[in-house]
Amino acid sequence: MKIDLHCHTKYSKDAISSLDEIFNQAQKKGLNGIAITDHDNNDGWNDAIIAAKKYNMEVVLGEEIKSSNGDILGLFLNKKINMKGENPEKIITEIHAQNGIAIIPHPFDFNNPFKNIENYLTIVDGIEVFNARRIFSKDNDKAKKLSEKYPHLIITAGSDNHICKSIGYAYIESPSNNLEDFKKDLLNKNIKWFGKKAPSLYLLTPMFKKIKNAISR
């Protein structure tokens, strides 16, 4: 089973694609599912569930929450986490209360690195070792080295798409054939990750949407 564990939809302020477009593209890329991780909201979950059934694919319900130190991915959630700007420990605790998995994505993003990351590696479940939107390859290289330094951590990979065309440039593969077993494989690190940098054109999408939003105000 192949799942892209970091995906944004039109419900993120800096992304443009509908759930139908996203699942259609994911299917074309040979994925079995995706994680919906919009910024600080779960507005796309219902549409995601409908689209997943339409395309006979799996969907991991999630959210990318902006903490006081940087972004945190909550995966396998059952309700929205209203904790934007809160301390990472509070957010991670809430993710675990939902029986979810807490991941620090793109920890060494040159523009928004996770501050004091090593202070949280005993309570977070894992880190994203490959993010297809990183402009500099060294950002992902640092994440991989950190995961090697802390082998207890789960590792994930995702496209971090903000436009449907960049879906599937990074994903996790496990021998499972259903979402429950995929989660177990992820926790037990019985997985492989794959990733390559998305085309630079796709990285400009957030800028275009921000300009559009500013003009429309």
Image (spheres, helix red, strand yellow):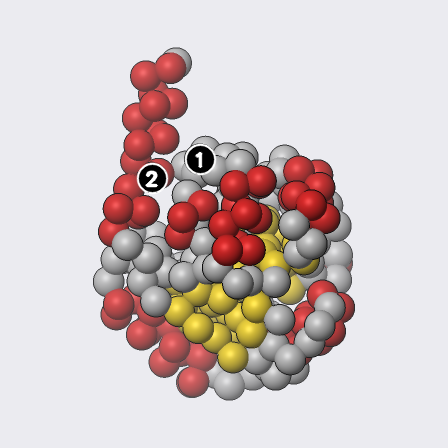
Q: Is residue 53 above or below residue 99?
A: above
Visible in this render: residue 136? yes
Across and down, in percent, residue 31 comes to: 55, 62
Q: Amino acid at mark 1?
A: Ile
Query: Which disc number belongs to residue 205?
Result: 2
* Helix, strand or loop for disc 1: loop
Across and down, in percent, residue 30 comes to: 53, 63
Q: Quadrant of the C terminus?
A: top left
Query: Which disc number belongs to residue 16?
Result: 1
Label 1: few (<14), some (14–19) or many (≥20) C-alpha neighbours in 10 Å:
many
Front in this rendered view, residue 87 or 28: 28
Residue 136 as seen in the image, left or right of residue 158: left
Asked whether disc 1 touches disc 2, contact meaning CB atoms under 8 Å apart, the reply is yes
Across and down, in percent, residue 96 comes to: 70, 62
Q: Quadrant of the N terminus?
A: bottom right
Across and down, in percent, residue 2 comes to: 57, 68
Q: Is residue 213 above or below residue 125?
A: above
Q: Amino acid at mark 2?
A: Thr
Q: Residue at the front extreme?
A: 28
Whole-number angstrom distance, CA of label 1 to CA of label 2: 8 Å
Residue at (38% x, 15% y) in the render: 216
